[in-house]
Amino acid sequence: MNKLVKAEHAPDPGLDLAHQRKKQAEKIIKSLQREERVKAFEERIQRGEPGTSHLSPDTSEVESSDEDDQEK
């Protein structure tokens, strides 16, 4: 009878998988939202909006891609 009780309280593998997928989806959504915020902020810097004058546009991506092209 003890085995029967344990089986009733065992976690449902389907629920665990659903929980894992939900957490994974939440992480992806947060990552996408962060990327959107970063992109919007970088655009504000490029336009020179108030409050961004002390920041400079990040050109490291452009420089590194030029170096990658030269290596090929």
Image: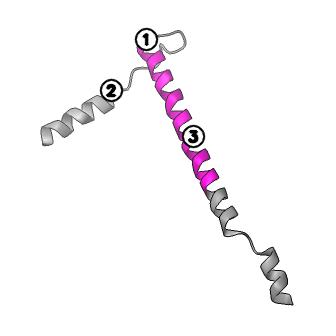
Compared to 39, does 54 lie above or below? above
Q: Amino acid at mark 3?
A: Ile
**In terms of depth relative to the viewer, which is nearer, 34 or 45?**
34
Closer to the chain start, of discs 3 and 2, is 3
Closer to the chain start, of discs 1 and 3, is 3
Numbered label attached to residue 47? 1
Image quadrant where residue 69 sits: top left
**In terms of depth relative to the viewer, which is nearer, 4 or 52?**
4
Please provide percent x and percent y for residue 66.
20, 32
Q: Amino acid at mark 1?
A: Arg
Q: Residue at x 25, y 31 (%)?
A: 63
Compared to 5, does 42 lie above or below? above
Numbered label attached to residue 59? 2
Q: Amino acid at mark 2?
A: Thr
Closer to the chain start, of discs 2 and 1, is 1
Say which of marks 3 and 2 sits in front: 3
The residue beneath circle 3 is 29
Does 59 sit left or right of 42 as displayed? left
Callout 2 crowding tier (Cα within 10 Å): few <14, some 14–19, many ≥20: few
Residue range in magenta is 21-48
Compared to 32, does 51 lie above or below? above
Does 63 sit left or right of 69 as displayed? right
